[in-house]
Amino acid sequence: MNPAIIPIGKTFMSTGLPLFAGTNHRVANLEESTITFGRKEIELAEFEMPGLMKTREEYGNTKPLAGARITGSLHMTIQTAVLIETLIDLGADVRWASCNIFSTQDHAAAAIVQGRADAAGIPVYAWKGETLEEYWWCTLQALDWGNDVSPTLIVDDGGDATLLIHLGYEYEVKGEKPDPSTASNEEERVILQIIADVQDAKGMNYWHQFAKTVRGVSEETTTGVHRLYQRMQDNSLLFPAINVNDAVTKSKFDNVYGCRHSLVDAVMRATDVMLSGKRALVCGFGDVGKGSVQALQGQQARVAVTEVDPICALQACMSGLEVTTVEIALEQTDIFVTATGNKDIITAAHMSKMKHNAIVCNIGHFDNEIGVADLEEMLIAGDVEKIEIKPQVHEWRFLKSTHGPNNGPHSVIILAEGRLVNLGCATGHPSLVMSASFTNQTLAQIELNENAETIGKKVVTLPKALDEKVALLHLSKFGAELTTLSTDQASYIGVTPQGPYKPEHYRY
Ligand code: NAD
Ligand code: RBV
């Protein structure tokens, strides 16, 4: 069972939970059947995650993460459970929260809290269907190690843990208390409130401690990496950062092939609508867009894309796709997928003109690609009705429109409230591709633990030799046989027989 967290003093917003819960955990449930199910799925996943399992074999004895305190803010899934237990086996102490309110797999969280026969569990703060207030509370609990102890390393996905540390620090530097009433959206209001409450409870040196203790962050996804480079450019980065996303064995695998698996998995689980023959529009033809398009094409949907970048647009043309705009495609499209990492891609005004029961979903990181916040305002004004089909599947009825059935209102079906559809409506990427991503994460954590001082307050990627190593660790799973270069051949193409096999500028 969850420990009874008895509120002492001030609780955080409407959560009813004390601002600092100490070293306990908070998950949906710790029933034996949930833990057992989680453990069985973790064991299945381990077989599909050779990179992580071989990393355990290679470093299990030397324990390069001994003494490290790792805070993770990354989807609490079965695949992440295998990452967490790898970090533990390499010697680290670990605390975890999810990086999305809908992405936790409750059986994974339960199994990780319980631990293994030979290894104790860890504090996890995550459950499927958190409110925004609970979400930021969970992030704070994962960051706070109790007794004014902070983490030494961060695993981040989307940059929320990094954001909280940096914002908290900046308010301390200014000697200012944030005013939540100045926030431009609900999430910002919650973030400002949690920083204000932490100041009240801990004074003006709490986040400064993090700046001293944290040796570095390894960032999982494109959007989080953008935030890190912005911080590096404006000299506000507090610690070294490793850009895991731009390892070739991450973005060219997870973002493409992972989404190729998990996008249609999510749309099918959510709606059971047949995709064949439907017109789909994928906004953004970067890595995630490319995987998403392949997934929809695999179902024989008729796919078009939108792009702003002429290179990606030309790639789409060469892949036989129509390149159009949201406005042009609006009235013919059955399924809209945003994959840009940008904001305001599909607005409420767009949705007011869509076909009846058009499906609208987002596979980019945040919830502002689709104008759900605007729909919420229209809801208050009485212009739309929100009908829950099931959790994470909602029909939004446009009450004033007349192009629905019988010249009445039309609806759109929004998945996962505009948040990551593959993690909200399905279980995210499958284990094998996450093994590559998370082997990079593990190597990045070792690198930060050992060499943070050499990196400095910069964003770097792992060396190509490690990227190739991650790929190599997964090849035997496929029975692949590599050709060996002769010394003569190697010198002819200007590499060594052991690699790296490509120059830095090669784009794959
Ligand atoms: P990317 O930069 O490779 O691709 C994004 C593309 O969107 C770019 O080609 C860009 O030109 C295009 N774009 C930007 N603004 C646009 C607009 N207004 N209209 C049309 N196109 C526009 O990034 P990526 O790696 O494909 O990641 C995209 C998003 O998905 C990020 O937020 C990333 O964090 C997230 N992501 C999600 C998952 C997942 O599991 N759901 C996996 C990996 C990445
Ligand atoms: N992602 N994790 C999973 N099954 O745990 N699935 C997808 C999982 C990650 C992926 O690496 C992507 O970059 C990130 O989620 C976006 O938040």
Image: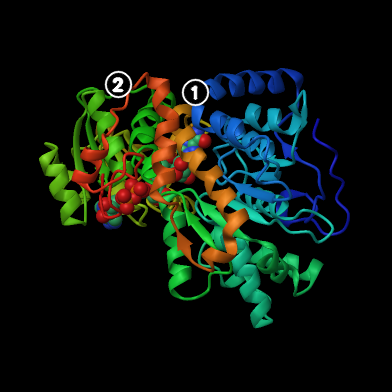
Q: Amino acid at mark 2?
A: Met
Q: Quadrant of the image for the C terminus?
A: top left
Position in image of residue 337 (x %, y %): 32, 41
Task: Give me the disc on residue 48.
Answer: 1
Who is closer to the viewer here, 126 or 90?
90
Who is closer to the viewer here, 11 or 1?
1
Q: How is the image coloured?
A: rainbow
Q: Residue furthest bottom?
A: 174
Position in image of residue 383 (x %, y %): 40, 50
Label 2 packing within 10 angstroms: few (<14), some (14-19), many (20+): few
Q: Give the alpha-carbon distance from disc 2 to disc 1, as whole Å.
A: 29 Å
| Image position of 358 (left or right of 386) | left
Depicted 315 relative to depicted 165: above or below: above
Q: Is residue 385 visible?
A: no
Position in image of residue 348 (x %, y %): 35, 52
Residue 105 location, quadrant: top right
Q: Is label 1 in a helix, a strand or a loop? A: helix
Task: Give me the disc on residue 257.
Answer: none
Q: Residue furthest front?
A: 488
Earlier along the polypeptide chain: callout 2 or callout 1? Answer: 1
Who is closer to the viewer here, 245 or 266?
245
Position in image of residue 19 (x %, y %): 77, 56
User: Which residue matches tag 2?
Assistant: 274
Identify which residue is drawn at 49% across, 66% down.
458
Label 1 packing within 10 angstroms: few (<14), some (14-19), many (20+): many
Identify which residue is drawn at 38% across, 29% down.
267
State yes or no: discs 2 and 1 in contact (Cβ < 8 Å): no
Number of on-image labels: 2
Who is closer to the viewer here, 113 or 46?
46
Depicted 302 relative to depicted 329: above or below: above
Identify which residue is drawn at 54% across, 65% down.
454
